[in-house]
């Protein structure tokens, strides 16, 4: 049975295939493809033997997962620019004007209809029977069974990216980004604000929550200032005083500048900031801090990388930041001079994020240090044929993603490098969604493509 039932697979926006699957899938081949009426801005979702997708023309489609045969279509007459959410009982559709439809996933018949107060650009998130929807006025929580609004949290700027949730603490949190360049944590039960943290731009894709190994009470062993460096502890205290936020970033005027950032000879667009200093194989190169504007936040001591939940965010200002999920305190930052174009996808050891410079940037999960090495200097990542606009998906030990050139890649997550490459005729605009034997991507010309690495028609799931 497939379980890619919402954007990036789950309520944490992990992008991981949770069910058993191939450990190291080979290069896939096209199994089938079909045309969609109107453009498609969001990835498909899967449940059992059906793939679902919405389009800008206002149609919701259900296709047979094995052969691509259309099962039904529901016409809303409203643009649908976000991914759907599907369960065994309902298929949830959010139109761009804020109208919410709950359909029968078997027949496409309407179960209920509701509204949120503002326009919607990003996918909703389903967690424990509650549908969280970010829109231009804020965040709404709806009961999935009835569509009843449970609470509404008004934000100063529109919500961008898909909400992410965690249930690790006594008070559950939902995390969202806004166009006012910040990340918010809200109580999932009430919508009350818990903390805010600044970013350099609008959040791309939405926050990514990574569960750690916190204490029995749900607290984060790294949450106390005693485990942080003096610089980070001081910045967190200043931020609390000046903005009422738990963020350790502070404003631009209060940033600590690291003047020993590494320079990649192949990187003529900017210099990346790391969180724990830079371990170069050769001498380090000083940079003009006024030009780079980089931030250096350090964490000292013997740190267990699995301890404590974290929230990873990438933004259009070129900032990748890891935050303490309970407090919003900055764990590390990594900064580039281009914009990030995908949300972070996080494995045990690495963080992957696409950017407008055509690279898949790769850092370690704990300190934000670049993972790849060149002859002398750390490399910012893997150079793609185009720009990745669709969030990667992790299948076993392989990271799968597509880019604007139409290339679909399989990349080894343990020792990041190309494993396989599959060319499509048009750029990949959304996906991949993942079943036990196939990838589902949408191309810029409105084709839904099923790429398979084994025959699923015999009922592998």
Image (tube, rainbow, N blue to C red):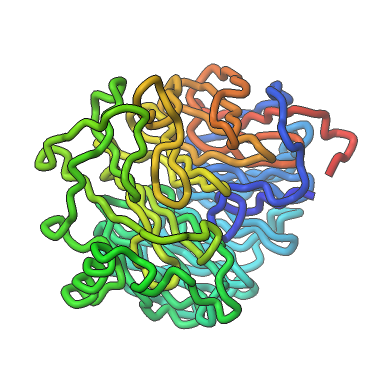
Tell me where residue 130 sits by quadrant: bottom right
Rendered location of residue 342, percent (x, y): 43, 41
Rendered location of residue 173, percent (x, y): 48, 72
Residue 227's place in the image compared with 352, above or below, is below
* Residue at 44%, 68% in the rendered image: 222
Rendered location of residue 328, percent (x, y): 36, 68
Depth check: 172 or 156 in front?
Answer: 172
Residue 85's place in the image compared with 146, above or below, is above
- In the image, taking residue 28 as reference, residue 176 lies left or right, namely left
Residue 121's place in the image compared with 326, above or below, is above
How many marks on residues? 0
* The C terminus, quarter of image: top right
Whether residue 280 is visible here, answered yes or no, is yes
Rendered location of residue 178, percent (x, y): 32, 59
- In the image, taking residue 83 as reference, residue 28 lies left or right, namely right
Depth check: 421 or 274 in front?
Answer: 274
Q: Among all residues in the image, which is located at the extreme right?
A: 458
* Residue at 24%, 62% in the rendered image: 231
* Residue at 54%, 45% in the rendered image: 349
Depth check: 286 or 177 in front?
Answer: 286
* Residue at 44%, 72% in the rendered image: 326
Whether residue 315 is visible here, answered yes or no, is no
């Amino acid at each position: 049975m497939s379980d890619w039932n919402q954007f990036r697979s789950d309520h944490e926006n992990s992008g991981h295939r949770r069910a058993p699957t191939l450990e190291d899938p080979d290069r896939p081949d096209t199994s089938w493809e079909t045309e969609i009426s109107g453009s498609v801005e969001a990835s498909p979702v899967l449940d059992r033997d059906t793939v679902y997708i919405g389009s800008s023309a206002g149609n919701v489609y259900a296709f047979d997962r094995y052969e691509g045969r259309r099962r039904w279509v529901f016409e809303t007459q409203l643009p649908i620019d976000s991914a759907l959410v599907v369960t065994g009982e309902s298929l949830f559709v959010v139109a761009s004007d804020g109208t919410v439809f709950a359909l029968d996933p078997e027949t496409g018949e309407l179960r209920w209809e509701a509204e949120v107060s503002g326009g919607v650009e990003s996918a909703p998130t389903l967690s424990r029977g509650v549908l969280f929807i970010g829109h231009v006025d804020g965040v709404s929580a709806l009961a999935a069974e009835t569509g009843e609004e449970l609470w509404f949290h008004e934000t100063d700027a529109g919500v961008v990216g898909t909400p992410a949730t965690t249930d690790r603490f006594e008070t559950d949190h939902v995390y969202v980004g806004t166009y006012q360049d910040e990340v918010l944590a809200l109580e999932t039960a009430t919508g009350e604000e818990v903390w805010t943290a600044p970013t350099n731009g609008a959040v791309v894709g939405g926050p990514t929550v990574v569960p750690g190994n916190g204490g029995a009470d749900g607290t984060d062993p790294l949450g106390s200032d005693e485990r942080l460096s003096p610089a980070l502890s001081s910045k967190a205290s200043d931020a609390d005083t000046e903005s009422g936020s738990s963020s350790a970033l502070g404003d631009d005027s209060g940033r600590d500048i690291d003047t020993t950032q590494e320079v990649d000879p192949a990187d003529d667009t900017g210099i990346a900031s790391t969180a724990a200093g830079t371990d170069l194989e050769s001498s380090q190169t000083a940079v003009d801090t006024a030009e780079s504007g980089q931030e250096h936040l350090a964490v000292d001591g013997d740190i267990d990388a699995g301890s404590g939940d974290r929230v990873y965010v990438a933004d259009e200002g070129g900032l990748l930041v890891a935050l303490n999920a309970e407090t919003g305190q900055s764990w590390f930052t990594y900064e580039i001079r281009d914009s990030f174009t995908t949300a972070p996808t996080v494995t045990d050891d690495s963080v992957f994020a696409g950017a407008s410079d055509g690279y898949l940037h790769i850092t370690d999960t704990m300190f934000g240090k670049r993972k790849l090495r060149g002859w002398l200097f750390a490399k910012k990542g893997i150079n793609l044929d185009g720009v990745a606009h669709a969030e990667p998906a992790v299948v076993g030990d392989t990271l799968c993603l597509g880019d604007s050139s139409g290339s679909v890649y399989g990349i080894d997550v343990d020792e990041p490098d190309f494993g396989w490459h599959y060319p499509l005729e048009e750029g990949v605009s959304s996906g991949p969604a993942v079943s036990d034997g196939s990838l589902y991507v949408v191309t810029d010309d409105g084709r839904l493509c099923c790429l398979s690495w084994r025959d699923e028609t015999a009922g592998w799931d």
